[in-house]
Image (spheres, helix red, strand yellow):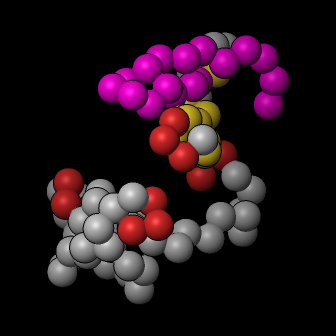
């Protein structure tokens, strides 16, 4: 809620966390100039996911009604290829 954020760059994505308590806050998606917020930090009801990405790396299938993209959707530069659980 307050204080400084520390940054660590993993591959190309800068990730930020609270310097005081260590909570992971966000990752900066550089290619899209958009932050990836840790949804667990949002109030209940403020997060409504629309799809899952990078499902080819999932250790277990995620069973829900949302699209499961192997990589990323075409609108984010991907192929729209999905996985079939």
Whether residue 59 is visible, yes or no, is yes
27 to 57, vertically: above or below: above
User: For the point 70% across and 52% down, which residue is it?
Assistant: 42
In the rendered structure, the answer to whether residue 3 lies left or right of residue 5 reads right
What residue span does the magenta drawing correspond to? 1-17
In the rendered structure, the answer to whether residue 63 lies left or right of residue 7 reads left
Q: Position of residue 17 (x, y in %)?
A: 58, 24
Q: Position of residue 62 (x, y in %)?
A: 30, 71
All told, the count of numbered labels is 0
Pick whichever, 72 or 62, lies toward us: 72
38 to 30, vertically: above or below: below
Outermost residue toward the bottom? 65
User: For the point 55% across and 17% down, which residue is it?
Assistant: 7
Membership of 8 in magenta stretch? yes
Pick whichever, 49 or 30, lies toward us: 30
Query: Can you tell which quarter of the image residue 33 is in?
Result: top right
User: Overall secondary structure of the magenta stretch?
Assistant: strand
Q: Quadrant of the N terminus?
A: top right
Q: Position of residue 28 (x, y in %)?
A: 55, 35
Membership of 53 in magenta stretch? no
38 to 79, vertically: above or below: above
Outermost residue toward the right? 2
User: For the point 18% across and 79% down, which residue is it?
Assistant: 85
Whether residue 62 is visible, yes or no, is no
Pick whichever, 10 or 3, lies toward us: 10
Pick whichever, 17 or 73, lies toward us: 73
User: For the point 65% across and 64% down, which residue is it?
Assistant: 47
């Amino acid at each position: 809620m307050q204080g400084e954020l520390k940054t660590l760059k993993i591959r190309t994505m800068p990730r930020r966390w609270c310097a005081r308590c260590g909570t992971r806050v966000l990752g900066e998606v550089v290619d899209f100039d958009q932050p990836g917020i840790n949804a667990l930090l949002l109030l209940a009801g403020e997060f409504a996911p629309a799809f899952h990405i990078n499902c080819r790396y999932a250790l277990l299938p995620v069973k829900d009604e949302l699209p499961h993209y192997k990589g990323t959707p075409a609108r984010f530069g991907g192929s729209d290829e999905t996985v079939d659980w």
